[in-house]
Amino acid sequence: MIKWISTLLVLTGILLTNLNIYPLNIYIHGLGVIGWTIAGFIKNDKAILVNFGLQIPLFTMGIFKTII
């Protein structure tokens, strides 16, 4: 279930980016990335952890940029 919700969040974030709806795109896509990272941790899938786990700091920087 977490994979489906995370996929919808990631795709929604991509759509919002294409529609130039900022900063909501960062928040929505970031939630999807966190969900996929949790799913990778639960399934012990290293490929998913590398892909989505490395995106977390990137989205964190984007979120901090919108706050500060």
Image (tube, rainbow, N blue to C red):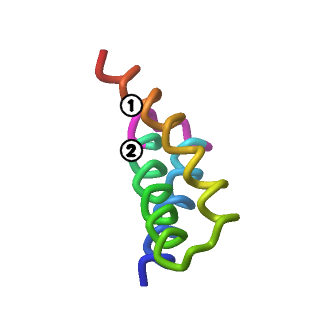
Q: Say which residue label 1 marks.
A: 63
Q: If you read the primary sequence from the N terminus, does the residue marked by circle 2 or circle 1 appear first?
A: 2
Indicate the amino acid at tag 2.
Answer: Tyr
Across and down, in percent, residue 44 comes to: 56, 74
SS of the residue at dot 1?
helix
Bin the neighbour count of mark 2 within 10 Å (Cα to Cα): few under 14, some 14-19, many 20 and up: some
Where does the N terminus fall, quadrant-wise?
Answer: bottom left
Report which residue position mark 2 lands on.
27
43 relative to 60, above or below: below
Q: Residue at x 46, y 29 (%)?
A: 62
Residue 18: percent from left, percent from top: 62, 43
Question: Which of these two is toward me, 48 or 16?
Answer: 48
The image position of residue 57, as x and y in percent, is 50, 36
| Above or below: residue 31 compared with residue 21 | below
SS of the residue at dot 2? helix
Image-based side of 24 in relation to 52, left or right: left
**Residue 65 located left or right of residue 58:** left
As drawn, the residue found furthest toward the left would be: 67
Work out which quarter of the rendered image holds the C terminus and state it. Answer: top left
Q: Residue at x 43, y 64 (%)?
A: 35
Compute the Cα span from label 2 to label 1: 7 Å
Which residues lie in the magenta part? 18-24
Are there few (<14), some (14-19), or many (20+) residues within 10 Å of tag 1?
Answer: some
